[in-house]
Every structure is written in structure tokens, then in C-alpha cells.
Image (cartoon, grey):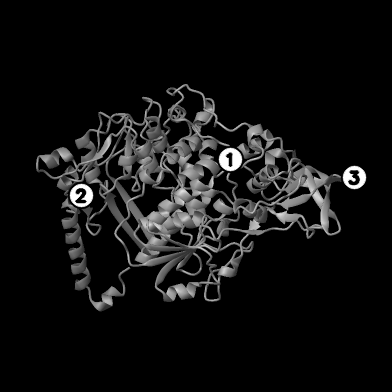
Amino acid sequence: MKQLSLMIDLNRCIGCCTCIVACRNYNDIVDHAAAKPNEIPYYLRVESRLRGTFPDLEADTWVVPCQHCSVPDCVSACPQGAISKDPHTGIVQIDKDICNGCNEVEGELTADKSLTSPCKANCPARMNVQGYVHLAAQGKFQEALKLMKQDNPLPAICGRVCDHPCESNCNRSAIDEPVAINAIKRFVADLDLKAETRFIPAIKAKKTAKVAIAGSGPAGLSCAYFMAREGYAVTVFEKETVVGGMLTTGIPSYRLPRDIIEAEIQIIRDMGVDMKTDVEFGKDVTVEQLRQQGYKSFFIGIGAQECKTLGVEGEGLEGVGTDIDFLRKVNLGEAPEPGKRVAVIGGGNSALDAVRSARRLGGSEACIIYRRSLEEMPAITDEIKACQDEGIPINTLTQPVRIIGENGRVTQIECVKMQLGAPDASGRKTPEPIAGSEFAIEVDSVITALGQETDWACLTPECACQLTDWGAMKVDSVTFQSDDPDIFAGGDAVTGPRTVIEAIAAGKEAAISMDRFIKGEDLGEGRQKEWADTAKGQKEKYYPAKRHSMPVINADERADNFDEVQLGLTQEMAIEEAKRCLGCGSACIQACPYNVIQFDPKAGISHKCNLCSDKIHAREQPVCAEVCMTDAITYGEYDLIRQEALAEGRTILNSLSRESLLYVK
């Protein structure tokens, strides 16, 4: 296949926009009578970038057409199948007769259709939610899966444990309830779990550079996936006997079955990633040793697995432990016996995991102790409801002040009732003790779930990395690069305990930076992006079905076992639920990495540069190349015009004297 393209000579382009005017007129996409400045969509756009500060200021100006990608994301994202890549010319085209503007309402959402759907804008990994949901609505499950895995290597895991901020911001809420996006994602991803049908993404040409990843939690796995996809030799070092980090050792199997974790990790292994267990980074292997072995970049994703203490009398008694230690034993099959009366102190997801696990292990009187109100619990709402469904008491506005024991073993917790005062720095109301409200709870064991910190023993003296005042790795907020240029970090080691999807997003972004670092490219260019989302949904045109609730095992049938509680949607339910999506933006626009696809309000469809394909078939040039007054636009076969541009660039450089090169920026 030939790949036709346009090449813009930045030394000749003066940003006059003649090509854009010709493009608009030729394609008849402008209503000149109604057009307003800066509100006219077009196939080409002009970008200007300023660098430096006055008087050492540089400006680059150039025209940006469609890149006609070798593997176009817009093709896989289009739910209608309206975008295709011509096998003879490599031109990516939108079929105007098939495109329906992602179900656009005529005259209503022309401006919003070019914006990002709130589901994508609020997803930390920036998954093209609208795209995969629309594909699922048409039963195109394999296509939906491929689109998911462009941004998230662990969709089946996320479909079970994600806190789904996409749903919290879904515009469908203004009509009835948000689309059950996470349940749709889980259904689609679960179809990929059989070994013989698993989707393994294409891997680019193998590179000689090696990269090392410390930690095999969601951040490390994500970074490994995206670096492997770029063709790098990736080695993951994990100090536990099993891979998966807190996915494996911290989340009970009734929420996240082990075979789901293993299946998605196996895909990453199948991509060529080497995973070494029982290797403690900083002790068994160091950064300096790996540098000497030819490793070019490092990612620190060791999580936060050191528990914070309660700081009260009696915390060292036998029978008092932490959520991390307790859940690790549960998940590795050590079957702890917490006793009948178990008190779990905390209000996060880990606290709920611990108390629900304790109930399943014989703790019939297990309970939660939390110092704030139920509304302020940081745990996922679905998990709080599941805890309540299982009959587990949640004692809110209750603060432990002392742990009491006999013969060295815990017997009681002394608590005080709390009331909420003025908001603290986080915006939550400060709990304050109520005088004279002390009381005691009889217990057999106590599990503290107060948050975690990171153990930084992995950072040996040769590392120049710095920590923040609160003990996290200090990294750039966009590139995830540390003070040691070849070391990057993400996940809980940077943010403190957060969500799985945030860790996945950090691994993905760090991989982009590591790839650029190894290539010697600018780490930050094009990364600062504002995610302006659509303010409203298509209330004038929507599928009227009500939201499908996630089927679950009855509470009385799950109290003594670790079988998965959520059963998943059926295919019929998944399709029906996906049809509820309002289609707030355009899936192709949200998929385009170059931001060149736009929405044509006149036609009610998406459009982009197609190199004037009708002129090409008539053996003519695209109209922009015809009218360019400075000959800045060259049309032809991609490899040929690229070689010409490189040759011309070398000629220009070679013509410069050694002295003048000192002033070239």
C-alpha cells in the first residue's frame, strides 16, 4: 500500500491561511452568510507555538492536516464504521453517507459535538468511553475491546474495582440515571479472558533499549504494557512471591477473582514482558547495577504498603493488626482466624474489604468504626451498600481512644462519640469529641485501616530522586519524571493511596515520557491539554430504557465464602445499557491524537482532510498544495517526501558554518 501524505515545510510556511480558505471553499463546508470569526470548522488548521522569553523569542507557525495514521484510532473508534483507510493510497476517509455525527440532534449540539464527552474528560486514563460504549451497543464487542485497550491494559480488572468517575459525570444523570459504563466495560473485557481468543495489541519494531519497572501493581503493569507495545525490552521486578501488587494481595477475591488478574497479566507477559518475583528493588537489585547492564530508563511503581498507626494506648497488643497484613494473608491463602467480634477502624475501600473478609472468616459480629459520617466515607458507594447488605454495622462518628487487653491480648476498644465541626483543609468537616460520651466495644481482634505510606528503601544512594514533605516521590505532574532524569514514578508511590484507574493512567503517561526520554525528545510537548467537556446531553433524542442494576449473589448466600459477588451483565443487558448513552461528543474527534477531526454543523457529521481524494483519483494535487504561495506544502508518497525533507534539512545544516551553528536554537 502506498501512503500518500502532505509535508509542510516550516521554513516556508508563513501562516497566511490561503490553503485553509481554498480548502473551505472547495469542500463547501462554510455557510458564508452565517459564518462568524473563529467559529468556522475547516479541514486544515494553523498552529503557532512560541518558545523562550523576550528578546530571545522564537515562533513556529505551520499548517496541520490529517496525518492519515498507519493505524488510525478514529477508524477503530467509529461506532458506525463510517471511517476507513484506503488500501491503495493510505488515505483515511469519512463516509458522509454513513456518519450520523454520533446520533447528533440537528441544530442542537453542533458546538458540543467537537468537545470531549464528560465520561472521557473525567476518566484519569482518558479512555474513549463514548466510542467503546457505542460499539458495544451494536454488538461490536471485539472492536470495543480493542478501543479500550488503547488506553487501559486492565479493563476486566477495572470493570470490577474502578470507582468509575465516568459515571459520576455522565450527562444521562440529568434525565434519569447515569449509564452503567463500568458494567459494560466488564462485560466486554470478560469476553477476552479465554486464552485462545485473547486480544494482544500489535507491537512496534523491537528496540534495543531496556527498561526496568519496580513493582507489579496497576501502575507498573500499565507502564510495562505501553512500553512493551512500543517495542522495548521490559523487565518488572516484584518483591512478593506473586505479581499484581495490591490487586493480588490487597483486594479480596469476592471483588476481584484471581483468575481475572492472572488472565490480564498473562497478556502483558505474552507481549514479551519479563516478570521477576522475589526480587526486592534497592536490595536484591539496584538502579546503578541495572544502569551498568544497559537499562536506559526506570519506573518506580512500588505502591504504598506501609500502614499508618492509630497512635493510641494498646496498639501493640496481640490481636491488633493492619488491613494490609490481614488481607495479604487472606489473599495468599493463609486463612487467618480473626474471631467472632472484629472491629475494623477506617472508612476506605480497604477497611470495607477487611471487614467483609473478616465476616466470611467467622467474624459474625464484625463491624466498622469510622470517625466521620457515612456521607464522608471515602469508600466507593457500591462497596458501602454491599457492606450494609451483608448486615455489617458501620459505627460512624466514633473515634477509638484506647485499646484495652488482658494477659497481652486485646479484649476491648474504648471509643468516644464525635460531632462534626468546621471544614478542614480537605474540605471535610472536622470531627470533634463529645465530652462524656465514652463507651467500650468488646472485641476479639482489631484491624486498623488508616491509610498507607511508601517504604523508600528501594532508593539507594546513587539515586538523585527527592521526596515530598509528606513522603511521596517528587515528580513532574505532567511527565512523571523525577529529579533523576532516567527515573520516573507513578501510582500510590506518588499520590498516596488512590484508585486503580489513577495508577493505570500514571503508568500510561510515564511510559510516554520514558519513550521520549530514550529517544531524546521533548517530554512535555503537547502534553498539557485542557479537557473541556460537553455541558449537556442530547435530551431531545435518547433511548428510553432504565439503567440495568448489576446482578449480585444474595447476601445470605455469600456470607461464608469468597465467591465473586457481582455476576456481570448478560449480553442483552449490556447492549441495552450501552444504547442509553447520549453520544455527547463525537467518538472520532475524541480518538484523534492530532486534534484534526472536526464537526461540521452544516452537514451534522464529522469531517477531516482526505487529501482531496477525488482530485487525487483525477491525478491532480490537493487544493491546498495548488494554492500555497510559498510552496510550503508538498503532496506525494509519504516515504519519498519525507526523505526529500530530510535531505533538504541536512543540506541547510551543512551550509551553515560552525560559528553560526552556535546560534541555531
Q: The C terminus is located in which quarter? A: bottom left
* Circles 3, 2 touching at the beta carbon (< 8 Å): no
Q: Is residue 44 left or right of residue 166?
A: left
Where disc 1 sits, the SS reads loop
Q: Amino acid at mark 3?
A: Gly
Residue at 50 percent of width and 29 percent of height: 172
Give the crowd class for mark 1: few <14, some 14-19, many >=20 residues within 10 Å.
some
Which image quadrant for residue 324?
bottom right
Say if mark 1 contacts mark 2, CB within 8 Å.
no
Q: Earlier in the sequence, mark 1 or mark 3?
A: 3
Question: Which residue does the image show at 16% across and 57% down from the upper left?
Answer: 640
Q: Earlier in the sequence, mark 1 or mark 2?
A: 2
* Label annotation for residue 5: 2
C-alpha distance separating marks 3 and 2: 78 Å
Q: Nearer the viewer, mark 1 or mark 2?
A: 1
Residue for badge 1: 563
| Residue 429 pos. (x, y %) | 72, 44
Instruction: Give the residue at mark 3.
Output: 436
Element class at badge 3: loop
> Nearer the observer, disc 3 or disc 2?
3
Relative to residue 210, is residue 8 drawn left or right? Answer: left
Q: Position of residue 292 (x, y in %)?
A: 43, 76
Q: Find the distance from the CA under tag 1 to the CA under tag 3.
A: 44 Å
Distance (Cα) linking label 1 and label 2? 55 Å
287 or 195: nearer the viewer: 195
Residue 413 on image: x %, y %:
82, 49
> Total number of numbered labels?
3
| Kind of residue indicated by mark 1 | Asp
Query: What type is the residue that disc 2 sits on?
Result: Ser
